[in-house]
Amino acid sequence: MDNLFTYENVEQALQKLRGGLNFPFVACYASTLGGRDNIAILLCVSDDKKEDWQNNILENSMYRKIDISNNGQVENFSCRWELKKMRKFTGKSIEHIIEKINKVKEIR
């Protein structure tokens, strides 16, 4: 399977995520902790506006933290939503990942 993004084009994937996710708060960053060949995206979304977070703390909002590997593996590793309808899946494209994450918002 081809990688969904590489070190050279990760910024395009980040822009697609920022523009496509329907949440009041979206933050995403590229991580090269595993080296350039294993670049990943760390994504954080909140269903609450930043100004509504109690004590201005993300973890007091309805948030999700998600890791997206360049091979398409998507894992929700931290969240506060009662309905954890998304834990792990393999994305076929950045658009597919956006669709799945937006669908989780609708379930809530």
Image: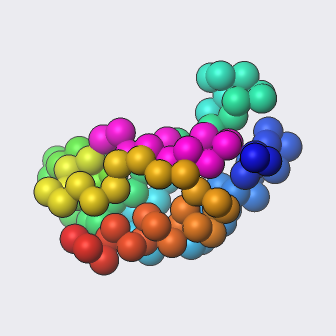
Q: Which residues are magenta?
A: 67-78
Residue 2, horizontal then vertical, whole percent: 79, 48
Could one spot residue 61 in this view of the protein? Answer: no
For image coordinates 62% across by 33% down, the residue present is 31
Where is residue 44 shown, x and y percent of the image?
42, 50
For the point 54% across and 51% down, which residue is it?
90
Residue 89 colored in magenta in the image: no
In the rendered view, does 74 fall on the left or right side of 60? right
| Residue under the point 69% across and 34% down | 39
Count the labels in the image: 0
Q: Position of residue 93 (x, y in %)?
A: 67, 62
Please, what is the dominant secondary structure of the magenta stretch? Answer: strand
Q: Which quarter of the figure is the C terminus placed in?
A: bottom left
Given the current orientation, which residue lies at the most extreme right position?
8
Q: Position of residue 10 (x, y in %)?
A: 74, 48
Could you say which is closer to the camera, residue 108 or residue 47? 108
In the displayed structure, does residue 58 sit left or right of residue 39? left
Quadrant hosting residue 97: bottom right
